[in-house]
Amino acid sequence: MERLGSLRRRIWEEDHAAELSQDPEAEEEDMGQPATFNQLVTAENVEAARGRRMRWMSQICEYWPLRRLSSISDADIETLFRDYAKPNTLQGGGKSNIGRARPGKIILAGSGPGNPDLLTRAAHKAILSADVVLADKLVPGPILDLVPRRATVHIAKKFPGNADKAQEELLALGLEGLKAGSVVVRIKQGDPYIYGRGGEEYDFFSSHGYTPIVLPGITSALSAPLFAAIPPTHRSVADQVLICTGTGRKGVAPDHPQYAESRTVIFLMALHRLSSLIENLTTSKGYPNDTPCAVLERASCPDQRVIRTTLEHVCAAVEVEGSRPPGLLVVGNACAVLNKFHQKWVVEDGFQALDDIGMEGDLPMLGEAVCA
């Protein structure tokens, strides 16, 4: 790591020289009076330069594979230093000219169902680039562990009755970061546009002059059934999939779909009002009591749980087994295609489906450093 230490010293000297060039009391006999003579060097400028150096070095360490860092050459050092010192170029999240303002950037990134290995590569890179992170309350720890130490993390304070206020607070924090020139990454559970208010957030930031970059995520609506061995479509059983919310705006129940034998219905955000949902489906929407269904919780996480049952017994099953949010309900004959049971309900705990997938060749694991 001696060469990295040398690079760190050189970029400090580069920034220090720039600071002196802006200091009216610095000796300028050989240089002549600079164009920035009257520009005051503030503590904020010095701190910004220090922050930029830290981001620059941390991104090299985070993005470059360990095997490359261990064999870094003098030529690599020269290339990195030239890139860092290049004027008017965005590097490591900031501009080379000290004190020059940079525009903020907002990224709406889907984090997938929970397991960090299911992040897209784009979302992973976005998280590593963040200065400010705005995260949903249910984004699991292993994904938040990927956030660089330099970044400020805000978790949505959403609980029943406070969802709208918490959302407004999170958006205000994001706007504050953007005005300060930060890279703001909004980590959203699942996919930003599948019941994630992604469209509303896009509209909010756009109305303030910041057009978001939107990165898709694997929605739990489709991945959770897969991890529970439930194919939402299956020949001769299910030829259509419907994704619904169990909670309407301001807590009002939405209009639930009518029963169709060949349809799989996936209800998100429905388990907290499960009893009224099941009553409506079976008494008003034509769903038979023996319709197979499954409660899928903490999909893709080590504590994933699957409760296989029918509409007749699902409320009792959840009451007995308890709740493990976030969760969803899958209803339809597809729930009994690959797993048949004869009890009132069956509980399956744990998730190891990704543990035995080996990474061959030179591909790094997701949580390790990757080359930009």
Image (cartoon, rainbow, N blue to C red):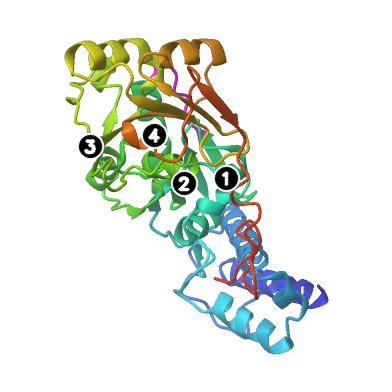
On residue 335, the disc is 4
Disc 1 versus disc 4: nearer the observer:
4
For the point 47% across and 46% down, the residue is 111
For the point 68% across and 82% down, the residue is 77
- Magenta region: 155-162
Amino acid at the residue labelled 4: Cys
Q: Identify the image quadrant of residue 329.
A: top left
Image coords of residue 46 (percent x, y): 61, 57
Pointer 3 local density, CA inside 10 Å: few below 14, some 14–19, many at least 20:
some
- Which image quarter is the N terminus in? bottom right
- Report which residue position mark 2 lands on: 111
- Report which residue position mark 1 lands on: 143
- Camera-nearest residue between 128 and 342: 342
Q: Is residue 158 magenta?
A: yes
- Report which residue position mark 3 lands on: 262
Looking at the image, residue 233 lies above or below residue 13: above
Amino acid at the residue labelled 1: Ile
- Under tag 4, what secondary structure? helix
**Is residue 286 among the parts visible in the rendering?**
yes
Disc 3 versus disc 2: nearer the observer:
3
Q: Earlier in the sequence, mark 1 or mark 4?
A: 1
